[in-house]
Image (spheres, rainbow, N blue to C red):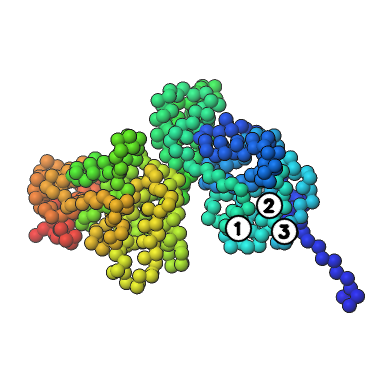
Amino acid sequence: MITHNTEFTLTRKPVLCENSNSLKMSTKTQITFDDIGGLDSAKSLLQSLATISSHGLKHLATMGIRPLRRILLIGPSGTGKSMLVNALASKLGVEILEVGTQDFANSEESSAEVPFIKKVRRHLILLDNVETLLGGKRDNKGGFAKLRAFISALPYQVFVVATCNRVSMLDENIRGVFDSEIETTVPKAEDRLKILKLMFRKFPHRLMDNEISEINSVLHGYTGENLESLVRHAVVDRMMRKGEDEAGSFDLKDLLAASKIVTATPMREVMLDIPKVYWADIGGMGEVKKQLMKSVQWPLLHKNDFKRMGIKPPSGLLMYGPPGCAKTMIARALATESGLNFLAVKGPELFSKWVGDSERAVRDLFRKARSAAPAIVFFDEIDVIATERKSSSDGGSGVGDRVLAQLLTEMDGIEALEDVMIVAATNRPDIIDEALLRPGRLDSMVYVPLPDEAARREILGICFKRHPVGSEVQLSSVVCNTTGYSGAEVRCTVMRRSPIVVFYYACKRTFRHKDRFTGSTGANGLHMPSQ
């Protein structure tokens, strides 16, 4: 029973306690900075911080400057953050003590006690995926206070390293606790080559230098973790095919086969089942194809040559023209032929009923594109999200205007779109907001016209290759009968007859009668049967 004489003793839970279940010693293999391919800037900075912390403390103390030992590593998963932490610990000659989520979940916000602090002086404290310590919520005020209290309680003799996949999930007050922010990015071509060469030292292979460069050229967007997985797949798959005794060394074919299985992490969320379309599958459009290759494909594949000659390629390209003229097929062929990462989105897909979600979708799309560079971002039906703002029906403050504003911000914002090309398609260029067509944005425009006679002949020739057509069918007459048709309508003249073709083919007969083609889909898209 509680009375007036009852005494209460109030205690606080420490942020961390000595027997914490969430504290664990790292058992990762000790590595050095020389074992890490690429990340030259991050390695150099960490090595400098380690050297100063080990040998320059007295000099810093005389000037009243505390050492820089609070580090935040930012970057996508698989880009080498954990390897950098291990290399730093090896350089310092200390062990890694990893802090888990349980202590922060159970501790009280105001507590900053670390009773075992004397035991951690010769350790590197690791807060791995620091955003998960806060429950993945940017507005987790209590969690931020606990984390800040914990870091502030640690003496500056202790190195504290936090890793983060999404810096947008961190409150600015938490970022202010750290002395340095170091970013790890998806490796570019030269860094991928360094990583691959380091990995190939560990495995027997039969690769020439030119073959290593060849496989490197098709691994756009692969992280270090992806590259390691690629090599493992190549080794294991060869062993499964050849047997353990005859497996021997893997070669270029093994790596190319493995690349079909292991996809780049930045592309996994946006990987689309894009049909393989080649330039040869598109009839006509020779001039359009050339413009696309010159404006989009060449600048991305021959970046150094353009830079050496001082040529600035267009930032983006807008394809416009009547519907059904193969604008989307051209974009797919561009992706297939170039071998570049391809992110495709239809305008309506970016809209959401939740406030802020549409803008976030645009930001995420460009974030993934930067990670997967060199890449092509294709906006189909861009007129849906880029309608001229003065003609907007929502009064200028609706979701459409906010999405367009976010799109413009991403295209010419502070973070440059290096090795990312924007390609868009529309049937209504007249309603596109002029701001999107300014230099530095969609500054190149390509008209995709209705197919002329030669183009229609090519389109029908491609279609006839896929169907059993007899010699009695005159290609020229079909070409003449389809004047003014779009490419889609020309193809439809054949596809409308597909059931008949299947029937004749099943009866071992060829499709001979030319009158089967006289009733076709007209230029207005309506079916017009023959009399």
Q: Is residue 369 left or right of residue 510?
A: right
Mark 1 Cα-neighbour bin, 10 Å: few <14, some 14–19, many ≥20: few
Check disc 1 and report the residue beneath it: 173
Mark found first going from the N terminus, 3 or 1 = 3
Foreground residue, 202 or 440? 440
Q: Could you tell me which secondary element the residue under label 3 belongs to?
A: helix
Q: Residue at x 60, y 36 (%)?
A: 47
Give the quadrant of the N terminus.
bottom right
State whether residue 51 is above or below residue 266. Answer: above
Q: Is residue 297 left or right of residue 39?
A: left
Check disc 3 and report the residue beneath it: 106
Q: Residue at x 61, y 32 (%)?
A: 32
Q: Position of residue 518 (x, y in %)?
A: 11, 53
Q: Is residue 285 left or right of residue 358?
A: left
- Quote the CA–CA distance across marks 3 and 1: 21 Å
Labelled pair 2, 3 in contact (Cβ < 8 Å): no
Mark found first going from the N terminus, 2 or 3 = 3
Residue type marked 1: Asn
Check disc 2 and report the residue beneath it: 151
Q: Residue at x 34, y 47 (%)?
A: 421
